[in-house]
Image (spheres, helix red, strand yellow):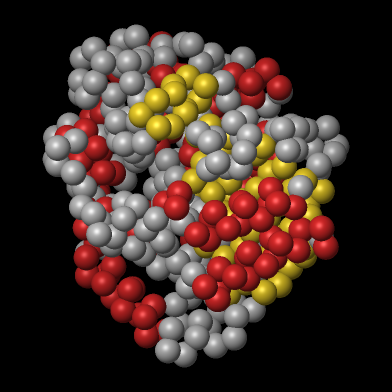
Amino acid sequence: MLVDKQQLCNAKIQQFASSQRHPGAMITTGHCAPRFSKVREAFEANFRAHDELGADFALIADGETVVDLRGGWRDAARTRPWAPDTVTNVWSATKGINGACFAMLADRGLMSYEDRVSRYWPEFGTAGKADITIGMLLSHQAGVSAFAAPATLADLLGGERSASRLAAQAPLWAPGTVAGYHGMTLGILSTALFKRIEGRSMRQFVAEEIASPFGLRLSIGLDPKDEDEVAEMLPVPPLEEGGMGNSNRKLERSNPIQYLTLTNPAVPGALANDAAWRAADLPSANGYSNARALASLYELLRRPAADGRRLAGPEAISQATHCRFEGVDLVKGIFTRWSAGFWLNPGQIYGPNLEAFGYSGWGGSFAFADPVAHIAVAYTMNRMGDRFDLDPRRRGLIEAVYASI
């Protein structure tokens, strides 16, 4: 049963506030090379200065894991320390896994980013969407960032039924002319398209082709057997109430595409703790992982493993990370750069190098690779913040990384 978003959100916030009166000792474990002591300092400062509850952070530099830290608690009651096998919902950082999967298909010759979506999914090519390519879809240019008619959380998790509904509707803008962040619908459309190309759902493919062979703790959705390892998510208010970047600002109804995309349906942060959410195949937002696994994923995108195995070759990765849109995003309302599967550094978000690519998740998580600096970085946590790219936890960690390399 899906959560009552306001009731559960308020309860979690109240529970978290209560836990602060008896916080207990903060526990930090793991490894940090002496050269990166500033990163450890930033990680621990998040607990002292920024109300961190539980988190982990990983940095791979020149092929070596030089930072692998974790600390705090995986529950609001502070009874279960964050452990090496702890995973949490990483929200839109999931989209990097989605991008990796399509890069693997391109590398195997099963598709091209210039192929029309309708080549594999004829029903999608209706109502003005016939010329939308896979690259356009993955770079948020398809104009299907929201359900055009009223939708519920059940529709968000409706799988093939919801994919068919999105495939039948007209685009919200002329495809290919501008980008608008497909925050949730990208996952519905991606796994439906992926299955039509490869034969397996994205959830199954990630389990069988990435997680298992490379030993990475990441998944689309969460297997019930892993329930004991997942961290409890402490939410921020729903987006319409100010959860998008500024707790004092409501969404602007003067931007109808943004408003429709972010509120139809409005998604509560507490949904990450819901069984229906964890059971879904939504590779835009319901990925579960930890920092070590996400950093390792991006390292594999950056270069082959020590034994020569790889996710995809350099040509496919080059295509997947090639800039396809640069400008003001209709939904985000800010300047950004999109490739066919990744958020390209728009400047200083992922350090100083524009070649860096990755994805950030609602609440604070992020993961990226910087091929110029030869690093892969990831951070996951369970107390969601509402400042997005201004989150001081995120900014402090990234600044410490680049101050150390």
Q: Residue at x 22, y 24 (%)?
A: 172
Q: Position of residue 323 (x, y in %)?
A: 52, 21
Of 2 and 77, nearer the camera is 77
Q: Is residue 106 above or below residue 39?
A: above
Q: Residue furthest right?
A: 307
Left/right placement of residue 140 relative to residue 402 reads: left
Of 305 and 22, nearer the camera is 22
Q: Is residue 34 visible?
A: yes
Locate the N terminus by quadrant.
bottom left
Q: Is residue 202 above or below residue 277?
A: above
Q: Position of residue 105 (x, y in %)?
A: 58, 23
Of 89 and 120, nearer the camera is 89
Left/right placement of residue 89 relative to residue 129 reads: right
Q: Position of residue 175 (x, y in %)?
A: 31, 16
Q: Quadrant of residue 170?
A: top left
Q: Residue at x 46, y 57 (%)?
A: 391
